Amino acid sequence: MQANRTAREPLYADDTRALRVLDAIDANIAVLDSEGYIISTNKGWRSFSANNRHPDGSLPRQVTVGANYLVVCSDAVGESSENAMLVYKGIRAVIDGRKRQFSHEYPCHSSDRQRWFLMKVKALPSSSPREVVITHIDITERHRAETELFNKQRELNSALLDLQEMAERIKSLLGGSYLPASKERDLSLARPSAPDECMLETLSRREKEILSALVRGERNSKIATQLQLSPKSVSTYQSRIFEKLKVDSVAQLVRLVSSAELK
């Protein structure tokens, strides 16, 4: 499969209103044909490309109209390769009709700031052969807020556990006296809920190790080095964890683990 080919007429070429609407959307949007070639992009997509040039100042041609986005993902190397392969499989599944849609959250850090994006892939209605719309949304602020909330929840959970231990010591000193039911109910917040605890118990020891690292915000490449695994193996474990815990992103993992620790 070729990585590039002669650019086709952009989608909606005769519909300037539709093009203006796409350009007004605060997201990076591209349309792929059934083979994975980019056939249309919006202003946000083109601006992001222009603002993230190669070190030599040239534009990244692999994401322009006429480039094959699937080839770009399948040929990716380095730290981003594991995410790129997940994206490749997700887009392919939507194009083939095996999935109605696909979403994936991923880091995309620049030289001067850390960034996170949400990618969504959906089939273009009534297109034959099937075409798909890819949308990349900047979720950096949301990711930072969720990380901060998670850290605060962990601190609260630790404080609740300390309070529970103190309460148990007081009960012991008082000869087995019990605390009022309202206090017991408050302290029960520190215990995991049965459903969440059961879901987490389905994970293997290795999956739990990788889950902990993912929740801490570590990259797959770093996890692979720490656990002496290949990045591909970490990516496979991550997919299994997502499937077992019925989540689609690391952000959802964070929320699930946080909820389990606080209930």
Image: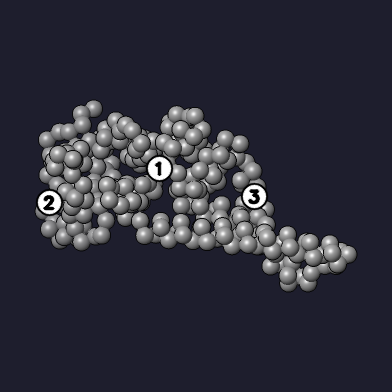
Could you tell me residue 134's position as x and y percent?
29, 47
How crowded is the residue under tag 2: few (<14 C-alpha within 10 Å), some, or many (20+)? few
Above or below, 29 against 244 in this view is below
Could you tell me residue 29's position as x and y percent?
25, 51
Could you tell me residue 69's position as x and y percent?
25, 38
Q: Which residue is mark 3?
A: 197
Q: Amino acid at mark 2?
A: Ala
* Screen quadrant of the C terminus: bottom right
CA gap, disc 2 and disc 3: 53 Å
The dot on residue 166 is none
Residue visible at 33% across and 52% down in the picture: 115
Mark earlier in primary sequence (2, 1): 2
How crowded is the residue under tag 1: few (<14 C-alpha within 10 Å), some, or many (20+)? some
Q: Secondary structure at mark 1?
A: loop
Mark earlier in primary sequence (2, 3): 2
Front residue of 2 and 189: 189
Tell me whether circle 1 and circle 3 mark residues in contact (CB < 8 Å): no
Q: Which residue is mark 2?
A: 13
Q: Which residue is mark 1?
A: 99
